Amino acid sequence: MTQGVTMSPMRPVEVAERQDEAPSQAGDTVFDIQGLQASYGSNVAVKEVDLEIYRNMITAVIGPSGCGKSTFIRCLNRMNDEVPGFRHEGKILYHGVDLYGDGVEPVEVRRRIGMVFQKANPFPKSIYDNVAWAPRVLGLKKNLDERVEKALQSAALWDDVKDRLKRSALSLSGGQQQRLCIARAIAIEPEALLLDEPASALDPIATQRIEELMHELKRDYTIVIVTHNMQQAARVADRTAFFSLEVDDGSRAGVLVEYDETAKIFTAPSDKRTEDYVTGRFG
Amino acid sequence: MASENVRVTFQEELDQLEASLQEEGSLVLRALRGSLNALAQRDLELADEVIAFDDEIDRHYLRIEQEVELLLARQTPVAGDLRLVLALLHINLHLERMADYCVTIAKLTKLVADVEADAALLQSLVEMGDRAEEMIRVSLDSFANRDLAGAESLVDLDELIDRSNRRFVERVVEIVAEPGLREWVLRMVIVSRTIERIGDHAVDIGEQTAYLLTAEFREFTDASHR
Amino acid sequence: MAAVEPTLTLRGDGRVRRRRIANRVAEVLATVAALAAVAVLGIVVWSVAKRGAGALSWGFLTHDLPIPFSGQSGGIAPLIVGSAILVGLAAAIALPVGVCIAVFLEEFARPAVRAGIQLAVDLLNGLPSIIIGVFVFGLLVYGHPQNGWAGSIGLAIVMLPLVTRATQEVLRLVPRSQREGALALGASRWRTVLGITLPSALGGILTGTVLAVARAAGETAPLLFVTSIYGRTIELNPSHALPNLPVQIFIWSESSDPEDHKRAWASALVLILFVLATSLIARLALARFRRRMG
């Protein structure tokens, strides 16, 4: 199901020519997920997941409610470890290293793979301290001011807050708080960013700014975004993975149905289930 | 897994749009039939009716254009739905062009009202016209039935029209020396070409059907290049 | 258009009216009960104030204890100082220990362990303070002179479950999303607790401690056996027995000198006012903290 990928952005009109192209060379693989199955206690949340996530691309994960998108993305930075009863099978290779291998520290994993959540969760501290907290804790104390400024610049928030860094983070608007959370995540210079429905609690203008921000961020980071907004996936993602629910003798689990370039998913998907979902024929 | 249609309103709008298009198609068929009859029977009143009738087709055309625009803006169709809407847009255009050609034929009929005609040539023009009519029917039916084979068969039908056109020109070359028929013949060459173009547009409609069904836009082998 | 009943008055029938009466009756009963509770508090404070206010004066608060049967008016300064030291030391013990237990229960303990320790804390909460007093006496004072340390330890045992419970409650108020945010940044669990969870809960923890202090200030039983024999002057050394309010109130109330009775009432008033004031301040602060947490 995975294809080699070209580094140039896909233009839909080239769909007609693609049959004649030689297979393109693979981009750098950042995550190689093999046979992943994740369950909470006896409930299998997601199963039979095989896919590769490539560097400096935005990969969207879409699908109906309960299809395991959030579970999947939380496996990528071991946040699921915090949930009692979580078990997994299969491998998640990050640059060839199994994230769940022996001796691998979740703390090290999360240092390199950051996460931004659905609802902005800034600490009840000042704006500066929000961004500076993790670097301090992780021992990155040199040039802290510059680090904070750079992170806020990258999150397109610097201009808004440069004169009030000492003010409480809770004084910012919802969209600004979410960008602060992004700044906080990139302040420790991760390689990848996982965004779990980052704009679903925001108004359309704030959402647009986050999407623009993602386009800029993908130059430096590998981004995986879970979204229930298909148009958002269509707008921002280079590749899209469609998960759906499979009901199997009374038990339900999420499965990966199709994973391809976003243009293909939204113009001519291979699987009828994908077509039904993106055209809204089934929710 | 039940593919229960959640977007009922959207589906109804799509169905309605396609029905409008098919209606426009039947109007074009009437226009063509009228212009061919006017040509064969040198019926000037009928020719005028055909010309006036074009306004109605234009109204359909504009309405469908607007509906497509609204559908795109409001419903953001993707995948199969998007291809359908784009196909509808293109077919709409092809139908309108065909209607314009019918007007052309009618106008030319009027222009040669008082001029002596060659019965054999006239007959072959009418036969060409019949073939074009058949092609329009096939193109619209294969679109309605999502019939890929039917759409592709249009290429062969177009080949027949093209051969008729060439034979027509050959015959014209033979008789163009006769001064009495010269004006008529020159006008009828244009009619022949016009009918051939109608056939081309029918093939284009077939290409849209193929695009809808295969998600690839492909020019059918173009007969006029041979 | 929906049909409207022809005789619409919206007045309701007999059933509705009976329900309304029942409602009123219930309301009235509840209000009476609440007023009764407030009344009890008011009566207690009032009677103490009535009997004790007379003896209250600046001199009363600053002089040393009177020599018995001497006619000296005397004061309760040593009692105030002693109580302050006892309670202060108790807080210094109970606060860190209580917070640590609470943090362990809320942030780190596995369910089985957690249930066991939670039960122990709850049982400790219910332990009669006289038992605590006897226990501390037996452990630390029997065979040795009385001392303030034992008293503080006894009070700390009384305070511990209160501090732990209050801390647990405010830790629970800190939203899970805060912890997730910190963990997602690569912080370890204990770094998250120290840097994010505890500072957010700080206001509530201090408030809980203040409430525990207010409670401990009035506890007599833990002090009765361990720091009840003391001098008349201010004593600062916890290795000696420390004079304190609750025990002295008890002693004076048993005395045959009516002046002593008056002093007992006055001291009781001081104690009540202290407890009321700190409780009130603590609860206001806690409410403000809850609002801030959202």
Image (cartoon, rainbow, N blue to C red):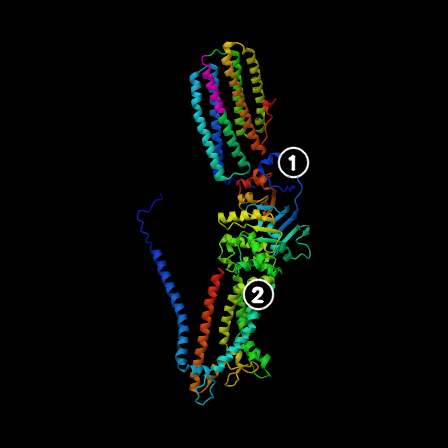
Residue A101 marker: none
> Is C176 situated left or right of B56 in this image?
right
Residue type indicated by callout 1: Glu
Q: Is residue C43 visible?
A: yes
**Chain letter behind tag 1:** A
Instruction: Report helix, strand or loop for mark 1.
Output: loop
| Residue B210 image position (x, y, % from top left) | 57, 30
Residue at point 51%, 34% (across, down): B85
For the residues labelled 1 and 2, say whether their Cβ atoms are less than 8 Å apart: no
Q: Is residue A18 above or below residue C73?
A: above
Q: Quadrant of the N terminus of chain C?
A: top left
Image quadrant in which you'd find residue A82: bottom right
Q: Is residue A41 visible?
A: no
Judging by the rendered image, the residue that carries numbered circle 2 is C103
Residue at point 48%, 61% (across, down): C292
Q: CA distance from mark 1 to mark 2?
A: 61 Å
Q: Is residue C286 above or below residue A237?
A: below
Judging by the rendered image, the residue that carries numbered circle 1 is A21
Instruction: Provide the major secondary structure of the magenta segment.
Output: helix
Camera-side mark, 1 or 2:
1
* The magenta stretch spans residue A192: no
Image quadrant in which you'd find residue B44: top left
Task: Identify the magenta region.
Answer: B98-114
> Is C166 situated left or right of A35 in this image?
left
| Residue C17 image position (x, y, % from top left) | 34, 57
Label 2 Cα crowd, 10 Å radius (few <14 / some 14-19 / many 20+): many
Residue at point 54%, 68% (across, down): C164
Residue type indicated by callout 2: Val
| Residue B196 image position (x, y, % from top left) | 54, 21
* The magenta stretch spans residue B100: yes
Instruction: Report helix, strand or loop for mark 2.
Output: helix
